[in-house]
């Protein structure tokens, strides 16, 4: 009997690790660090138990972090592919862009550099006019502008999201807790995972098994591509699946809207 290889496509922040204030269990284990080397994100005992269960499974991050921020994650470790910046970049084990993805990315990235800068400037105008305690900037990954990041209090982010969404109708407005991201169409976790699944399957003689792990509504499209999906307790997905009539089907519609 041939053993099927297992690959887990894993969101990181608020799925496998989170800031101290979001941890609901003790004791905590350091998982990621800030630029100065101070602990920033942690594992709970439940997350550590899950990672132990996944020993022998190839873990592939599917994260909103760019590569620089991903390198600040010390646990878990990744030895295979990486998907960064909300799906904008698909990297090989050597942390270089996959050649097959570079072809797709080059056509999109140049087109969206200008609109991303304009969106960031518009966000700053709203922030200044309304005197919001928010900070906005264009995130780059391997020198490519990939999305606009806006951080701050959730109430103020929700206020800003309502006002800026009509100006970003061709992209996705992704909001979760203290983070708001204006994503161009090429920053698409599901498209990146689908592309990588095809890349993986070209190298195998047996069909792999895919597990997906994610917490945000915008993770739902890539979770649907996997054979199994794991959702953290108290996550955005779980809250909508339990609270919205129609469960995950309805929540998926909400996620598609950003």
Image: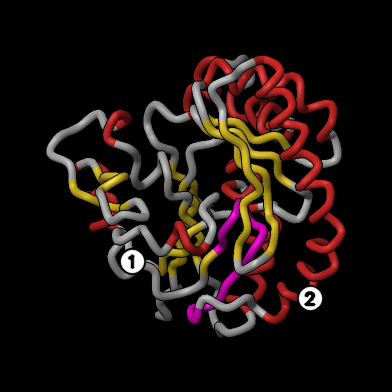
Tell me if residue 217 can be seen. Answer: no
Residue 23's tag is none
Left or right, residue 41 beside residue 67: left
Q: Which mark is residue 103?
A: 2
Vertical position of residue 257 compared to residue 108: above or below: above
- Specify whether residue 202 is painted magenta: no
Q: Residue furthest left?
A: 27
- Disc nearer the start of the sequence (2/1): 1
Q: Residues within 10 Å of mark 2 (few under 14, many from 20)?
A: few
Residue 217: quarter of image: top right
> Does the CB distance between marks 2 and 1 fall below 8 Å?
no
> What range is drawn magenta here?
83-94
Q: Is residue 165 above or below residue 116?
A: above
- The local secondary structure at tag 1 comes to loop
Where is the C terminus found, in terms of image quarters? top right
For residue 234, side relative to residue 113 (left or right)? left
Q: In the rendered view, would you say 214 is above or below 258? A: below
Q: Residue at x 31, y 53 (%)?
A: 33
Q: Which residue is mark 1?
A: 77
Q: Is residue 38 left or right of residue 173?
A: left
Q: Is residue 254 visible?
A: yes
């Amino acid at each position: 009997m041939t053993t099927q290889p297992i690959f887990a496509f894993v969101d990181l922040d608020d799925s496998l690790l989170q800031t101290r204030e979001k941890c609901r269990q003790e004791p905590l284990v350091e998982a990621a660090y800030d630029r100065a080397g101070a602990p920033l994100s942690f594992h709970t005992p439940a997350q550590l138990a899950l990672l132990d269960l996944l020993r022998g499974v190839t873990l592939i991050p599917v994260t909103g972090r760019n590569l620089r921020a991903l390198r600040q994650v010390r646990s878990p470790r990744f030895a295979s592919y990486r998907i960064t910046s909300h799906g904008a970049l698909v990297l090989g084990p050597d942390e270089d862009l996959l050649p097959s993805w570079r072809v797709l990315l080059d056509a999109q990235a140049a087109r969206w550099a200008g609109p991303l800068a304009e969106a960031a400037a518009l966000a700053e105008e709203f922030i200044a006019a309304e005197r919001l305690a928010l900070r906005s900037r264009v995130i780059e990954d391997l020198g490519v502008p990939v999305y606009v990041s806006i951080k701050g209090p959730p109430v103020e982010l929700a206020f800003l999201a309502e006002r800026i969404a009509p100006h970003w109708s061709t992209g996705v407005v992704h909001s979760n807790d203290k983070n708001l991201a204006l994503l161009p169409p090429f920053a698409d976790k599901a498209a990146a995972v689908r592309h990588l699944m095809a890349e993986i399957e070209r190298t195998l003689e047996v069909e792999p098994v895919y597990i997906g792990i994610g917490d945000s509504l915008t993770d739902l499209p890539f979770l649907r591509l996997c054979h199994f999906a794991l959702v953290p307790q108290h996550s955005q997905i779980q809250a909508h699946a339990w609270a919205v009539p129609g469960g995950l089907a309805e929540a998926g519609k909400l996620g598609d809207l950003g």
